[in-house]
Image: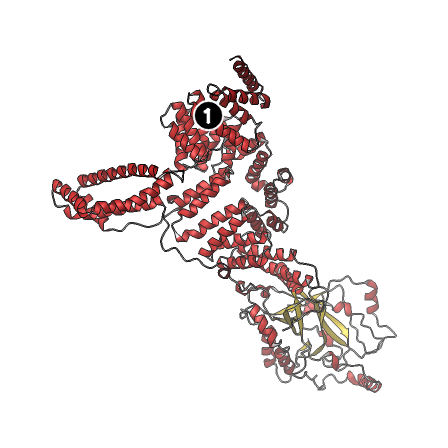
Amino acid sequence: MTTEVSNDGMDIVNHMDIKVHGIQNVPPSWWSDGKHPTYPEHPFRYEVSFTIDGNQTFTLANGRLLQYLPQYRDYIENAALPPLSSTAKDVLRQMHEVPEAPTKGKSISTTKTTGNSQAVEDDAQPEARIIWITPPTSERAPTPSEELLGKRRKKTAGNSVGEDLTPVAVPEDDDTPPCMIRMPLDERHIMALESMMLSGRPLELKFTRVLRPGLPTEWEDKQEWYFRAIIPVDLAPLSDPGSRELSADIQLQPVKAAVRTEEVKKTSKRSKNMSQGLRHEEIDTEGEHPYVTCKTSAVVSIELEKTLVQLPKDRIRPAVLPTNLIPKRPPPRKEFRDSTRQFSDMVASIAERMMHDCAALQDADSERKEEEILEVFENSGRLESYKEQLLPLVVNVVREKFLSDKDVSPDVISRLTNELYVHLLNSIHCTLHNMVEGMSTPEQENANRVATAKPSTASPQGPDDGIDYVWLERAEEAETIRDYARATRCHQARIASCACAESFPDVWYDAASYFVRIGETTRAEQCFREAISHDPTHAPSLMAYGALLLTFDRFDEATVYLQAAVDAKPSSLSWGLISLLCDMHALNLERGPRYESQRAHWEHEGTIAMREALSFSTDVDHTSVSKEVADYLLKLQHPGLANISLTRCSRGGHTEVLYARLFALGEQYNEALETLKNGEGLEPYIEEVTILRGDCYAALGRSDEAIREYKSVLCAKDKEPRRRFGPSYIHLGNLLITAGCYNDALGAFTIGIQAWPCSLTWLGAGIAYYRLNKIDAAEECLSESNTLNNTNPRTWAYLSLVCLRKERVELKTVLRQAIMQGLADPGLLTELGRDLVRACMGELGESCLRKALAVERECGREDSAVCCTAMYYLAGAVEGNNAEEAWMLYTAVANKTMDEVLRAKAEEQLAALGKS
């Protein structure tokens, strides 16, 4: 099938039929002075014209002032244009399921005129109306003989007012109805109509009076300007989804044009050389227009082939669904359990069975119960069975939790396993003994219930109760301090420990969003696909994956997932992303013959999507959806897409904040500060603006200004601590510790603990207390931080310093944990090494200092202050055993350091070594 194309090459996507039922309440003066409405040689005809795009004009011509006879009324009401071809209609039905219109537009004029015509008596004069029932081709220029005959009839016309005249014949059924016109609509017309509906602007039909064909050429209607009018058709009824028809009785509005004085003077008098057949009327330009006085109105109806406002389910969308691209993954048959969980469940099961075996002995005396229990365990073989069940689980726990070296020898594993196994048996025996000896009667009843109950497998009721939330919290903490390697491991551990099938989509989505933020797009796409495979209707994953595909111009795939997101959970954001998709299509079109047509199509689809998005938004600002989309894309760190969305937004207010975030995301911090400085309407967003300025100053190394901005919001006395500013409290506290303002840092972290009681805020408070030499308080804070997250090497490192200051025997164990967790802070390693050397723990101190040097050299910072300090203290640690290495280290310090005090000390040590 070939697509219907307009004259300028654009595809026709809809059709609009307009019917003018007639002009009623015509001013009486139009047929006064002996001029009957059906006078056959009445000189005037009437036209209704309109245009949508300003280029092409459609006209209903040859309207006549006639008595509104019943046959005319019936013809107009039943008039219809030929239907479209069945093939085209079928295609349109497939593209848009058009529901029945909510109100069938039976003509209003029928209601108003039918009853009146039935009530009219036989001898009453029918109402005069301007109607379109004769085609323009029915009137032609008269022949000379007909013209002569017409002049003879004019002489007697004045005396034949009441005579019966032959009515004008209506067209045949096969003829095109003169009262109707069909307009093919392309994408530009559709956009223009939608713009009218959104703005409330009517479709204006122009009503004019013209001379009928065949009149003498010297005749001129100089009063035509006075009879011009506008018929404003309100398109609001077509804005309802699924509506295709409207019918209205609309009052004519005279054209308010300035009347030329000379023209009024000329038309007020009869010209001597003008034919007497052209009738003129007295015009009162100062008084009320006859249209207004007589309430002259037009009855107009409009019918569309397809609805202008589509229902969401009728939108054009791909036939492919996400399940066609990503097969749905079946739910796991059983929950994942790590080694610790398996071990705990097995111990609970064994204890449960043991209690069940002992339930029958509750009536015996105490000594008899002990004998029976021992006999059961020794003779039945159950003890050996329990050992066999626990042994592999204990080995797995040892491998996972206690051994960092994967290539450890079997002897080491066997020795450690034996020790743990003996401890386990002792614990079980003691526990069971206490349970049997210490039970009262109510507790025995509880034991019976426990023995017959099944182990609970219910998942945690809230996120704070499960390991899932713990790993998510740790990942957020690591991302806050830009430790992306640790954050990645936390997300991986969260995925591996997820035990609830319903949580899989959210867990994978959080990991995917994290990988998008750090630029790992390949891993992000893999995680998004995993989330969708577990739940094809997971709207957050569908939207985020669609946005990711848009960044790589993979529009076809993005369409599948974004449209599925709208189906799964329609919202202002999901529809806004559809609108962004259409904008991207329009921006990436190639110039060619069909460029304008395709561009208009995507602009039209984008307008539809934006209208749907606004229906979900509570904000009266029409750019609120674009701002919401831009904010969402900035959180996912898609600056290019966010920039496109911001082009739709008016400048000022929240738009300036979003532009500043866009600049900061691109590391254009000076431009971001300039935007926030010159932006207007930022008062409602002053807190967000201040925090953003602090982030920019901190990134530029202007710590004093960053601290000032942070403090003005985070440390305000009249403001409660808020969770959304949690990372900012950590940034402020770290800046203050770096600046040596430990009391201020402690205050910042104390407020931060109220807003976000995470391990990082407790760690910051512990560091501040340690620097203030309040060791006990520091130990409490550091222990709390370690309880919340025992994988942070900095926490273990500061606990090592506390143990060193308190001379705790756990020092080596704590320090070993810090190294095992991957401590790589050269400054902290140097401090540890220095204090250990001073405490006469040269071997431990030397290992810390060498690790600090290795980290600095690997990063190419051999001349840094930390590196020189580490070399100085390492030289002191090895001076007694390796004087040559100490000499080399002191020499390097003296040559590279910028610290004059440290250089002087190194030179002094070199002199001492030289003398020795």
Judged left or right of residue 795, residue 318 is right
Question: Mark 1 — residue?
Answer: 846
Q: Nearer the viewer, residue 243 or 73?
A: 243
Task: Give the image location of residue 349, x and y in percent.
Answer: 26, 47
List x then y, in percent, for residue 767.
Answer: 45, 29
Q: Nearer the viewer, residue 77 or 706?
A: 706
Q: Residue furthest right?
A: 273
Q: Could you say which quadrant of the image residue 798 lies in?
A: top left
Is 622 situated above or below 109? above
Image quadrant in which you'd find residue 847: top left
Check disc 1 and give the amino acid type.
Glu
Q: Helix, strand, or loop for circle 1?
A: helix
Q: Position of residue 261 (x, y in %)?
A: 82, 63
Q: Is residue 895 left or right of residue 840?
A: right
Q: Quadrant of the N terminus?
A: bottom right
474, 192: nearer the viewer: 474
**Residue at position x 55%, y 40% from top?**
688
The reply to whether residue 610 is in sight is no
Which of these two is toward me, 397 or 543?
Answer: 397
Q: Is residue 166 left or right of residue 320?
A: right
On the image, which quarter does residue 329 sit in? Answer: bottom left
Residue 906 horizontal/vertical position (percent): 54, 18
Classify 279 as above or below 341. below
Tag 1: Cα neighbours inside 10 Å, few (<14), some, or many (≥20)? many
Above or below for 730 versus 137: above
